[in-house]
Image (spheres, helix red, strand yellow):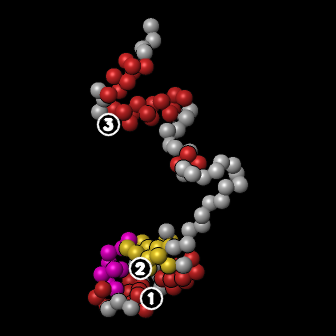
Amino acid sequence: MAASKEEILDAISNMTVLEIVDLVKMMEEKFGVTAAMPMMAAMPGMGGGAAAAVEEKTEFDVILTSSGDKKINVIKVVRELTGLGLKEAKDLVDGAPKAVKEKVSKEEASSVKQKLEEAGAAVEIK
């Protein structure tokens, strides 16, 4: 005999969070589905359909992920781009991954990334 919905809910309510996570994974695998919310369902108030416009991101953060082999050159470029003092720029480079510039335009973010990469740093834009 199959368990009723109420019995299933009672069983789930007695599980730990880790047990529930495992159960969800097992259900996803068994039924070939995902528990992730569909993108359109995550945005209330938007009209359905493929013609719905998605807002384009206008502010970007430039993240220094690594100083690479030419740390001194990277520190110089960070100082030039941010106006920080030598100690502050060195601390920023040593503390990578860290944001060098935040909430800048796409063009400025690309320019900053290019300058840092030319100095030998690893950079990403978020």
Q: Position of residue 97 (x, y in %)?
A: 38, 71
Closer to the observer: label 1 or label 3?
3
Q: Position of residue 36 (x, y in %)?
A: 50, 43
Few, some or many residues within 10 Å of mark 2 (<14, 14–19, 20+): many
In the figure, is residue 47 to the left or right of 80?
right
Residue in the image at 37% along x and 73% along y: 98
For label 3, the residue is 17
For label 1, the residue is 81
* Between discs 3 and 2, the one toward the N terminus: 3
* 1 and 2 marks in contact (CB < 8 Å): yes
Quarter assignment of residue 33: top right
9 or 121, which is in the foreground?
9
For label 2, the residue is 100
In the figure, is residue 67 to the left or right of 44?
left
Q: Amino acid at mark 3?
A: Val
Which of the image's four quarters has the N terminus? top left
The stretch in magenta equals 89-97
Residue in the image at 33% along x and 22% along y: 10
Residue in the image at 38% along x and 87% along y: 75
Q: Position of residue 77 (x, y in %)?
A: 44, 88
Mark 3 lies on a secondary structure that is helix
Evaluate whether residue 32 shows in this view. Answer: yes
